[in-house]
Image: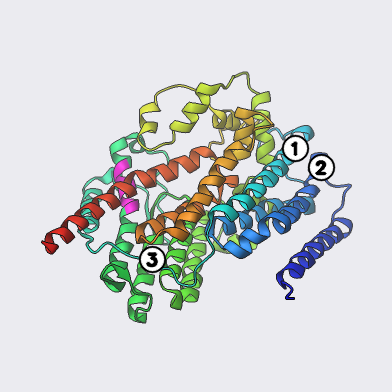
Amino acid sequence: MMINSKIPLRYALFFLANILYIIFLLIVVDWDLIIKGYKITAVLPFCYIFCFFLLLWKPVINKKSPFVVLFSFIAFIRYFVLSILILSNGGYEGISGLDPSNNSLNLAAILMIYELIIVSIFVNIWSNKYIPEPLQLKNIRTQKQTYVYLAFILIIIITIIIIPEAHQGLSFLGSINLNVEDNEALSNIFILGIRECFINAKYFLIFVFITIFSSYKGQLKVDISFAKYLVLLLLSFIVIGLRIGINRKKLLADTLAISLLLGTLFPKYKRITYFSLIAVGTILVAYTTFYRGMIESYDDFFDDFFDVDFFQAYFLGQYNVAIAIESIKFSSYYLNFKSLLYDLFRSVFGIGSLLKNIDILVASDLFINRMSIGLSSIRKSQIIPLIGQGYVYLGVLLAPLFSLIFCRIGIFCDRLYRTTQQLEITFLSCYGSFYLAQFMILNMNIILKNTSFLLAIFIPVFLLNKFFSGLMIKKKSL
């Protein structure tokens, strides 16, 4: 009778992780210096260890799908690494002029534990039910004609050149243009449309070159020459580096999605693909962080990488959740179902522009107001985490509902990635999986805005090209 060697390894690592963490708590942590509201933080790493080894291990090891893997990694940073840094630091003071109460910090930790356990249970169930096992080699097909893509790219290039407002904030590699966030042109749906078309056009450019270099009768050849692969790799550098705005999470989503796409299409060069593209993405994140004023030099990005302020800003831990909890307590405003609907639709492409003049306060407004207490200015750049948004609208019991919804969509993207044979849908599922995997450190407004803006342009252009490609094939067959 054969023994599955992965089972003893799994439980050996489970007990080792617990033992090492207990040693850390007993030897390294000075409990007398820890702020009272952060003592419960010690439970968060235990929660992650249990959830990962008991619930997430099989989905990560067996499925190896992008959403599941990245979600588990982000949860590790948020619950394990950030918690250790907070405990080592004695707490986290934050940027608000009024720190959250100990009761709010305790409730925040409980909500985070609740969220991780519930989501991990459903990741385990849904991944086993819906995500197929990985294939050694995936067959990908392309559309035989890409004339619509080429026409779309050409029109957008010409348009963005002749309309100055459309290319404000355009950044390329290390040349960062910060003139984007407060521009009045961003409220113009026409200008927004051009800018989003430009973002989509760079993805279609990759599809065109992949089709030219590796397509044979609509089927992709996995064994292309190194010269052709190198051109695709350099083009990927350009696509990742060419962007509008300074959103680092979108930059990472581009990097990971393109890396996985090329790695899936050309497994012979998988290691080169992952190493080079992820290295470029990391460097660009460091550049962007510097230009946003979060660090004083490029060296500080790596020197401060394990700083509690750095991780808190990216992974929205206990402090941000506690501020979200107090956003209701410190406000006389009442949020209702109308506020929730407005909060949902105001971020959706097209609909948001129609709703922009409606004066309704939403959860993020209350969160910003609470965060800004005691400060000389409003801190609009702060993000309310999804579990905090769920608490504000739905209360304690249903607080993880938004997290579960986006988790389910992420699982759908993983299933689509495994089952589709279409090049463009493969990329779209990669991008969706990687972006949705960040749901714990984002909120529904950010997720809906970026996904709807992408889909509103991507899908119509893809379908239009598919329609004309089909017409040309029928014409040739007559």
Q: Position of residue 73 (x, y in %)?
A: 62, 58
User: Are the residues flagged by discs 1 and 2 in contact, CB closer than 8 Å?
Assistant: yes
Q: Position of residue 84 (x, y in %)?
A: 75, 54
Q: Mark 2 = which residue?
A: 35
Residue ID at (44%, 35%): 347
Q: Is residue 90 above or below residue 185?
A: below
User: Are the residues flagged by discs 3 and 2 in contact, CB closer than 8 Å?
Assistant: no
User: Are the residues flagged by discs 1 and 3 in contact, CB closer than 8 Å?
Assistant: no
Q: Mark 1 = which residue?
A: 105
Determine which of the numbered discs, if any, sits on residue 236 in the image.
Answer: 3
Quadrant for the C terminus, please: bottom left
Q: Quadrant of residue 106?
A: top right
Say if residue 156 shows up in the picture. Answer: yes
Residue ID at (56%, 21%): 336
Q: Secondary structure at mark 3?
A: helix
The one of 473 and 193 positioned closer to us in this rendering: 473
- Give the mark nearest the N terminus, 1 or 3: 1
